[in-house]
Amino acid sequence: MGKIKKLSNDVINSIAAGEVVERPSSALKEIIENSIDANATSIDVDVRGSGENLIKVIDNGEGIEKDDIPLAFERHATSKIKSILDLATVNTLGFRGEALPSIASVSRFTLKSKTKNSDIGYMLTVEYGKVGKLKPISMNNGTIIEIKDLFSNVPVRKSFLKSPSTEYYHCEETFIRYAMVNYDIDMKLFHDNTIRYSLKKSDLEKRLYDIFPDMKGKLLYCEGEGKGFSFKIYLSDLHYLYKRSKKHYMFVNKRPFWDKFVYRAIYAGYGNALQGKHPFFSIYIDIDPMVIDVNVHPRKWEIRFSNGDDLFNSIKESVSSLWKESISISNSYNGSNTRNYNYDYKNYNYRDRDYTYVKEETKPIQTSFTFSDTMAINISENDKKDSSKNRKYLQILDTYIVFASFSGMIVIDQHAAGERIMYEKLINNIKGDSQPLLFPIQVHLSLYEDENYKKMKDILHKMGFRINRLGNRIYVIEGVPAGSMDISAESFVDMLQEDLPTEDLYDEVMKRIACNMAIKAGHKMTEEEMENLVIDLFACDNPYFCPHGRPTIIEWKGEEIERWFKRR
Ligand code: ADP
Ligand code: MG
């Protein structure tokens, strides 16, 4: 007998399930997409635990006719495309007809649906791929999907899942992404009986701020168009950049996606103003469906553009024009929550128009120069003691403080210096003295940030933070460590990015606070601020390096300067 056998449907479905449903959030994505495709105007999502326990979605869409219900669980059964021609212009989110059979092969799946043409609805249960009997039920128009015990018949897949909170976090991110572009739909998200989001039908911009209330007043808007495409972008003003947090949202024809060229184009548009930091952005691209191929990825997360260069350049130009000149936001967005751009960035350093694109991961900066004996980092005691008022400070590139020393010229990196000062203040503030904030700062944390916050909470308190919980993941910062220089909601949230080490947690938290509360590069300083910073730096036990090991201060001795001019 031959060895080749045709695989059974069960096996085919669970193989496909591996491609389509990688984790609970990917099942949720498919189900939300189906509700959107069914023209629902209300979608309620309920997730229990990680999502493996239960994902339930209730919509008021068109529903499925009785006879079609069993068909929906057959592979490549779809109501959305009929021929290969439709494939090129598909404007629904689904079209492969793979999602329901795939998910139902790895869960206990229940579908209930009623169309407006029928007085009653029907319910079908599929247990790990075994299709049950259709039963009549009474319900409202629309569809209710329940996915229980996801992956419990495929332990291998289960073992690839991350912690329940991470899996839930992905579910929430999925919900957010679809909610951002489906602003004409009322959408709710519940998690373990708590309501996370309750979003009323609105418009694109209002929906954005309904989801991210903290972003109000911190984003700029720009738009652009080219042959066969147009786009809108909301993105961080230069004052609201993040050290670590990367909240980036991309949509093409109302479909969430990810593309590294789009990401680079936006970063490129910031020029060198980012200085290793990250903006929040949300870009909405509308493009002729004929020039993209959404079919490249089984989960349709990546998209291929056939006019990628035009799009890339147009995005970059549009973003960089925000900093080039003062522009006001297009009329339709006036009077909104988005800031009008009117800063004077003339003095910013934008010579470097042809910079190379920003590296995807910004690592802590490594300095490559070696110190020569004429370029000392050991500042003389005379210089340290000389805090006389007659020393003139000059700030260059809004980042470095320059002044004459007794034997040459000193250059200080204001941020690195600020970090060092803050770090030592924290170390020495053993009592954890706190200074109250004149204007307490409210922060809304994501699930991930909240988890990190909980781990750091006690340490933060010991260091002088006074933080109260206002509600579900909402806190108010009322006090900060005594002698702190600067705190904003962004810098606080930034501190909660990236996983925390299990060892030396205390030191890591101190470094993060020091880094986030220190004066930033790109911040204009008054003469007095510069003077105070220099005095504070010289008072440090180790003034020469920031807590990450970057130099804070360099002196060029006279001999070195003489050499520049060939006097030696
Ligand atoms: P696809 O979305 O790629 O067509 P799915 O497996 O996700 O494939 O769904 C199969 C079919 O079931 C869809 O084409 C649609 O006709 C129907 N369907 C699924 N979910 C819903 C829903 N919430 N409302 C109405 N019809 C639905
Ligand atoms: Mg679908």
Image (cartoon, rainbow, N blue to C red):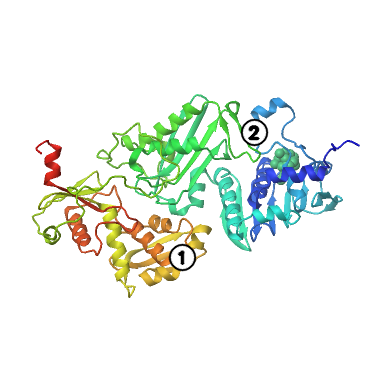
Measured Cα–Cα span from mark 1 to mark 2: 45 Å
Residue 412 spot, x, y in % from top left: 22, 51
Is residue 35 found left or right of 224 in the rendered image? right
Residue underneath mark 2: 295
* Dot 2: element: helix
Residue 549 spot, x, y in % from top left: 32, 55
Residue underneath mark 1: 503
Is residue 524 found left or right of 458 in the rendered image? left
Q: Amino acid at mark 1?
A: Glu
Q: On screen, 388 above or below 89?
A: below
**Residue depicted at 13% across the width and 61% down the height:** 381
Q: Ligand 2 lies in which image quarter?
A: top right
Depth check, front residue: 151 or 338? 151
**Residue depicted at 46% across the width and 31% down the height:** 312
Respond yes or no on whether mark 1 lies under 8 Å from ligand 2: no
Depth check, front residue: 524 or 122? 524
Depth check, front residue: 42 or 400? 400
Residue 319 spot, x, y in % from top left: 40, 36
Q: Nearer the viewer, mark 1 or mark 2?
A: 1
* Dot 1: element: loop
Residue 326 spot, x, y in % from top left: 31, 37
Q: On screen, 208 above or below 285?
A: below
Query: Would you call the spot at circle 2 few (<14 residues within 10 Å), some (14-19), or many (20 or more)?
Result: some
Quadrant of the rendering where the C terminus is positioned: top left
Query: Would you call the spot at circle 1 few (<14 residues within 10 Å), some (14-19), or many (20 or more)?
Result: few
Query: On the image, which quarter does residue 442 sit in?
Result: bottom left
Sequence order check, earlier mark of 1 and 2: 2
* Residue 115 appears in view: no
The answer to whether marks 1 and 2 mark residues whose Cβ atoms lie closer than 8 Å is no
